[in-house]
Image (cartoon, rainbow, N blue to C red):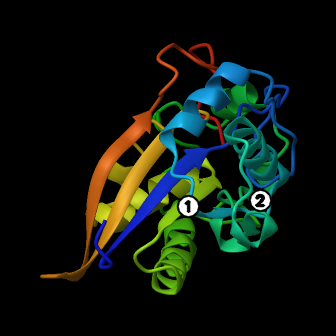
Amino acid sequence: MSGSETRWWWVRHAPVPDGGRIYGQRDLDCDCSDAAVFEALARELPRDAVWVTSNLVRTHQTAAAILEAMRHAPEGGGPRAVVELAEQHLGDWQGLDRKEFFASQDRARYPFWYGPAGERAPNGESFHDLIARVATAIETLSEEFAGRDIVAVTHGGTIRAALAQALRLDPEAALAFTIGNCSLTRIDRLAGSVAAHGWRVGTVNHAPWGRPYAQRPAGHGPVS
């Protein structure tokens, strides 16, 4: 890898037993019991990477499970928690029954998320807001660790935001990406490109364990 290329390895956290409720930035535990999934991720991820997570516990637990499968400790003694990489804050929607939310508020016309990308949840954020804060964190970390591999264990919304930035997508279009639990998305930052810092997308929603994993039944709406 050249010194002008910084590779981001994005991993979404493991499944959250949420009781059918919208969780957003609620700090819930996740289920890291499927050892085969973490062993597969351990084989895919680079050993000399910088590791970051969000500030939410489900990303810490997922990173720990991967590192245990790798039998490896990252530099600095553990992943760095970066609050700007947290999931979208869904404000007053957090804790609501997901099925009732979609039934009572005519949300079925938004198949990919809880509403349009520009809608700010009451006392929370919009997906536009999420993209702005995630983009700032990505640029800061890419400058700090230029030429390195960065493993970022974060959230579905965060990873969609990273793809929106990399591909210069309309935020509404970026919501159409499927980002499954524990899936791997790789995006390379290429310094010195025509656009100052270009981005190359290597893979999106890759499941290296090769079988269905933690898929929600149809009709439950999106999962934060």
Mark 1 to mark 2 CA distance (whole Å): 37 Å
Q: Residue at x 82, y 28 (%)?
A: 17
Of discs 1 and 2, which sits in the foreground? 1
Residue 192 vs 88, above or below: the answer is below
Residue 120 vs 61, above or below: the answer is below
- Secondary structure under tag 1 reads loop
Classify the position of the C terminus by image quarter.
Answer: top right
Q: Amino acid at mark 1?
A: Asp
Left or right of residue 89, residue 156 in this image: left
Q: Amino acid at mark 2?
A: Gly
Nearest the eye: 112 or 166: 166
Mark 1 residue crowding within 10 angstroms, few (<14) / some (14–19) / many (20+): some
Q: Residue at x 51, y 79 (%)?
A: 145
Residue furthest toward the left?
A: 194
Image quadrant in which you'd find residue 204: top left
Nearest the eye: 48 or 58: 48
Circle nearer the N terminus (1, 2): 1
- Secondary structure under tag 2 reads helix
Classify the position of the N terminus by image quarter.
Answer: bottom left
Let me know if residue 107 appears in the view.
Answer: no
Let me know if residue 210 appears in the view.
Answer: yes
On residue 36, which mark appears?
Answer: none
Q: Residue at x 77, y 59 (%)?
A: 91
Residue 189 rendering spot, x and y as whole percentages: 33, 70
On residue 91, which mark appears?
Answer: 2
Left or right of residue 146, residue 188 in this image: left
Image quadrant in which you'd find residue 196: bottom left
Residue 190 rendering spot, x and y as whole percentages: 27, 73
Quickly name the residue at label 1: 48
Residue 216 rendering spot, x and y as whole percentages: 63, 19
